[in-house]
Image: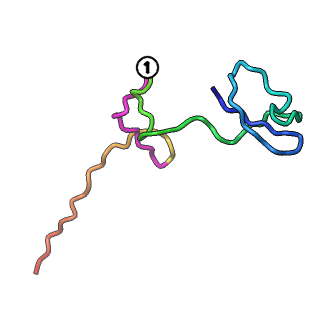
Amino acid sequence: MPTYEYKREDGTTFEIVQKMSEDALITCPTTGQKVKRIISGGSGVVYKGEGWYVTDYKDGGRKSASTPPAETSDNGSNESKAETPKPDVTKDVKS
């Protein structure tokens, strides 16, 4: 069950555990003041581990995680660069 945070008329806040199907409180159960439910900054999601993997999803149409991404050329397109042979830099030196 989620924990909801409420703010009383006097500016103080309190938390209460309620079912999601329950209506929001109108008055504070301890003081009887009018209350308003507020959105708190925390979230209930905790990320653990090394990250997300393609194998975590059932979609078989995606690329394999082991496939390296295509290199981008200087103009920003995703064309593969062909390897150009390197010139032979050895020179004959006469002494």
Q: 8 and 54: which one is in front?
A: 8
Q: Position of residue 81 (x, y in %)?
A: 37, 43
Q: Position of residue 42 (x, y in %)?
A: 65, 41
Q: 64 and 69: which one is in front?
A: 64
Which stretch is magenta? 62-74
Residue 73 in the magenta stretch? The answer is yes
Residue 39 in the magenta stretch? The answer is no
Q: Which amino acid does the dot numbered 1 rest on? A: Lys
Please name the predominant secondary structure of the magenta segment in the image.
loop
Q: 85 and 70: which one is in front?
A: 70
Give the quadrant of residue 38: top right
Q: Position of residue 13 (x, y in %)?
A: 78, 42
Query: What residue appears at the point 37 percent right and 33 percent down from the top-left corner?
Result: 65
Residue 48 in the figure: left or right of residue 41:
left
Query: What residue appears at the point 30 percent right and 49 percent down from the top-left corner?
Result: 84
- In the rendered view, tell whether residue 29 sits above or below residue 60: below
Residue 27 in the figure: left or right of residue 81:
right
User: Tag 1's secondary structure?
Assistant: loop
Query: What residue appears at the point 85 percent right and 28 percent down from the top-left corner?
Result: 26
Q: Can you identify the residue that label 1 sits on?
A: 58
Viewport quadrant of the N terminus: top right
Q: 65 and 86: which one is in front?
A: 65
Q: Position of residue 74 (x, y in %)?
A: 47, 49
Q: Residue furthest left?
A: 95
Give the quadrant of residue 33: top right
